[in-house]
Every structure is written in C-alpha cells, then in structure tokens.
Image: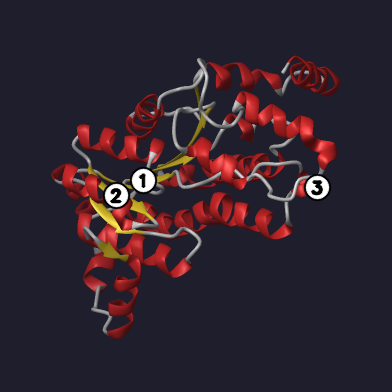
C-alpha cells in the first residue's frame, strides 16, 4: 500500500475483480478470531501535517497498523519511513474513497477505526464567502467524512465492532462572526455524528467527536489563505479580529499541541465506553458551555471582545 495511489487500485479493480466470495463469507467466529490474532488497524485522513500526522505516530506507538492518507503522497513519505502504510486520498473523490477503504481491509484484515481528520476552515463574513467556496467547504468537511463512513460501515458491521472518530471543533458547538461557513460545516458533522451514533450502536460500532480549540499547527496558515480576497470594507473589524487573535488558527497561550489532540483521539479509539464528545484544550472546555448562554449575552461578549481587540 505504501506510496501507492487509490486511483491505481481502482484501475486494477475495474480490469479484473477477483472472486472474494470466501472473504464475504468470513463472519462471526472467523472474524472474532482474527481480531485477537492480528494488530488493530486504523485509517486516518489528512495526515500531511498537524493533528493527522501526530495521530498517525501516536497510533504507531500503540502498536496499531496505521494507514495514513493525504492528497499529496510526498507530504507523508516520512510517515512511511516511520512504519505507517501510506496512501493517496482526496476525500472529495468518491472512487478514491471506496478504493482506499477496500484496500485497507484487504491488506490489514479489517478496519477497526476510521479517523475523519481531513478538513480546512473557510473563514470570512458570509457576505464575502462565494457560493463555490461554501460548497467546497462542505465537500471536504462534511461530504468527505460521510463518504468514508458509508464505505467503512459495511465492514465494521461484518466485523461486529468498529470505532469512527470524527475530528470536529469547538466551532461545531458555537458560531462566531467571521466563521459562519466553517462553523456550519462542523455543526453538520456534529449533527450527523449524533444521529449515526444511535443508528450503529446495535452493531457495536461507536461514533466519537473530538472538539479541539485552537491548535498549534499549519492550519492557521490555511485559515489565512482561505480568507476571501475580495473584502467588503464594512467588515474590516471582523477581519482585524481574526488576524489579531488567530481565533481559529493556533497561536497564543491557550492553544493545544497537536500531540495533545492525538493522545485524546487514541484514547477515544481504544477506551471501552467512549463518551460522545471530547473537548480538547481550555478554549474548547470553556466554549462548550457558551451555548448555554442567552443569545443576547453571547453576542454581547463577542462585541466586547471586538472592541477590546
């Protein structure tokens, strides 16, 4: 699997698809036996940097078989050197998604855990966010995890167990001015995870949300890149707030290290009865209570922060 692309797997599969009737018939006791004789496997998306990279290394430390994916294979070559299986994956490509899941199962024996980590933040006042940019935000942050989850669940049901860890954000529970597009995508991920958790519980498949606050990663650079080029001057105060505070990025004394988030993800994947959500970092813990504030008070606090900055 290392250094291969999902597209390569699709091409060969379309040419001559082998008879896997024996594999499909291996259920029940056979799969139970496999779980006790093989290393557990995890597929992680978005491993080129930050949380994804740290998570891949953290699972390696726990002796898992790690399938690390990214759009550009050169970004994860060092993870292959460290012991990960690496594969090219664009979560917006349905064919690649299907191929990666199938190859993970074929080459590792199962898919015990799926970590939906790939994502980015489309920031800016909603009036300045183009419809195409909003569509792209949802394609990566919402439809991508949905594609992967749909492809992985049949295997997890057949195994009789599985764990889906969705990396969301505290922005998935509250929304602030200038983060509307990103917050909408993370709110959608949270809503889907809540529904899915109940739907798959009878099959011993757990669904867990990770909700970091600011994290010290290159994510902040991508935030700056995704701010609209054409800016309405009336919203300068919002742009200034993001540039001065790195509210979504990762600078500042309250930011978490990516390794801290990775440790929480591994715990969520391995504990026997995980909670539905794991806030990570002080901003996330305090922010999780903000949704209980009256709307006027919450809006007033934001207005005060804007004046102070």
Image vertical order of residue 86 relative to residue 246, above or below? below
Q: Earlier in the sequence, mark 1 or mark 3?
A: 1
- For discs 1 and 3, the disc positioned in front in the rendered view: 3
Residue 307 location, quadrant = top right
Instruction: Measure the alpha-carbon separation of dots 2 and 1.
Output: 7 Å
Q: Earlier in the sequence, mark 2 or mark 1?
A: 1
The type of colouring in the image is secondary structure
Image vertical order of residue 190 relative to residue 147, above or below? above
User: Which residue is labeled 2 in the image?
Assistant: 76
Position in image of residue 22 (x %, y %): 22, 70
User: Which residue is labeled 1 in the image?
Assistant: 47
Position in image of residue 144 (x %, y %): 51, 55
- Look at the image and tell me whether residue 62 can be seen: no
Q: Secondary structure at mark 2?
A: helix
Q: Are marks 1 and 3 in contact (CB under 8 Å)?
A: no
* Label at residue 301: none
Q: Secondary structure at mark 1?
A: loop
Label 1: how many Cα within 10 Å (few below 14, some 14–19, many 20+) = many
Instruction: Measure the alpha-carbon separation of dots 1 and 3.
Output: 32 Å
Q: Is residue 40 left or right of residue 225?
A: left
Report the front residue among 294 and 38: 294
Residue 104 location, quadrant = bottom left
Residue drawn at point x = 53 percent, y = 54 percent: 146
Q: Is residue 99 left or right of residue 178?
A: left
Instruction: Measure the alpha-carbon separation of dots 2 and 3.
Output: 36 Å
Q: Quadrant of the C terminus?
A: top right
Q: Is residue 64 left or right of residue 51?
A: left
User: Which residue is labeled 3 in the image?
Assistant: 127
Q: Earlier in the sequence, mark 2 or mark 3?
A: 2
């Amino acid at each position: 699997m290392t250094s291969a692309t999902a597209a390569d797997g699709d091409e060969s599969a379309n040419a001559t698809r082998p008879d896997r009737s024996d594999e499909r018939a291996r259920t029940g006791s056979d799969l139970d036996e496999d779980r006790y004789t093989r290393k557990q496997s995890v597929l992680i998306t978005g491993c080129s940097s930050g949380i994804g990279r740290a998570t891949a290394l953290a699972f390696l430390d726990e002796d898992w078989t790690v399938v690390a994916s990214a759009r550009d294979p050169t970004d994860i070559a060092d993870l292959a050197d460290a012991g990960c299986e690496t594969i090219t994956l664009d979560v917006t490509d349905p064919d690649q998604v299907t191929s990666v899941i199938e190859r993970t199962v074929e080459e590792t024996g199962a898919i015990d855990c799926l970590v939906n980590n790939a994502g980015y933040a489309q920031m800016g006042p909603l009036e300045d966010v183009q419809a195409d940019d909003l569509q792209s935000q949802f394609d990566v942050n919402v439809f991508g995890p949905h594609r992967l989850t749909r492809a992985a669940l049949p295997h997890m049901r057949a195994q009789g167990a599985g764990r889906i860890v969705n990396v969301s954000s505290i922005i998935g529970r509250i929304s602030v001015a200038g983060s509307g597009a990103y917050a909408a995508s993370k709110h959608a991920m949270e809503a889907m995870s809540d529904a899915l958790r109940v739907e798959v519980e009878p099959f011993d498949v757990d669904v867990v949300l990770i909700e970091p606050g600011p994290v010290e990663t290159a994510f902040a650079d991508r935030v700056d890149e995704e701010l609209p080029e054409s800016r309405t001057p009336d919203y300068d105060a919002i742009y200034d707030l993001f540039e001065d505070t790195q509210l979504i990025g990762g600078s500042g004394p309250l930011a978490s290290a990516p390794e801290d988030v990775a440790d929480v993800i591994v715990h969520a994947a391995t504990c026997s009865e995980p909670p539905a959500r794991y806030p990570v970092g002080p901003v996330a813990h305090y922010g999780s209570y903000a949704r209980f504030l009256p709307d006027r008070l919450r809006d007033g606090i934001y207005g005060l922060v804007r004046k102070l900055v």
